[in-house]
Image (tube, rainbow, N blue to C red):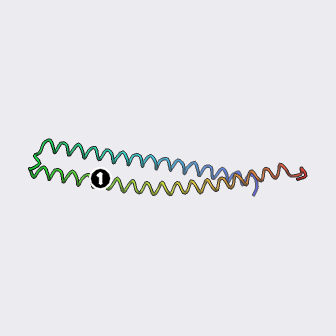
Amino acid sequence: MSYAGILATVNLYKSEKNQLTSDLSDILMNITDASKKTADLTAQETEKKSYVRENYDKEDTEYQVQMDEINAEFEDQLSQVNAWESELEQQKQAKETQVQMTSSYLDSFTEVLKNNVKKDFTYGQGK
């Protein structure tokens, strides 16, 4: 393979690695957002339950109805966020694998380029 061909391949893998790294960064930001969403949901649940505790008598049936509604709403929203977070974790693992493979290819072609340059440099020097 010519220098130009090897160099073009190296540049292609560099570009691909940069794009994959950017995609991975976006996924990591979304994972952070999912964690924040979980914390926000927990805070909202606590706030709603505090309101019910302050404004309803524990012996009142409305108290239990309100608490059950809060719990159901929280569990539903939390399951949605957990599903999203699981999906993001899978995407993260896939991108990390792609970055590792691309890095390996990049390292291989970079080494081939170095060896070809070294051969040409030493060619004709009696070695």
Nearest to the observer: residue 4 or residue 98: 98
Image coordinates of residue 91 in percent, x first then y, are 47, 56
Number of numbered discs visible in the structure rendering:
1
Image coordinates of residue 17 in percent, x first then y, are 59, 51
Image coordinates of residue 63 in percent, x first then y, are 13, 49
Using a 10 Å C-alpha cutoff, classify the residue at mark 1 as few (fewer than 14 neighbours), some (14 to 19) or many (20 or more): some
Amino acid type assigned to the residue bearing label 1 in the image: Gln
Q: Residue at the location (88% across, 53% down)?
A: 127
Q: Quadrant of the N terminus?
A: bottom right
Q: Residue at the location (40% across, 56% down)?
A: 86
The quadrant where residue 80 appears: bottom left
Residue 92 appears left or right of 54: right
Return the residue found at the far right: 126
Q: Name the secondary structure under disc 1.
A: helix
Residue 40 appears left or right of 72: right
Q: Residue at the location (32% across, 56% down)?
A: 79
Residue denoted by label 1? 77
Q: Residue at the location (61% across, 53% down)?
A: 103
The quadrant where residue 83 appears: bottom left
Residue 89 appears left or right of 98: left
Return the residue found at the far left: 60
Image coordinates of residue 30 in percent, x first then y, are 42, 48
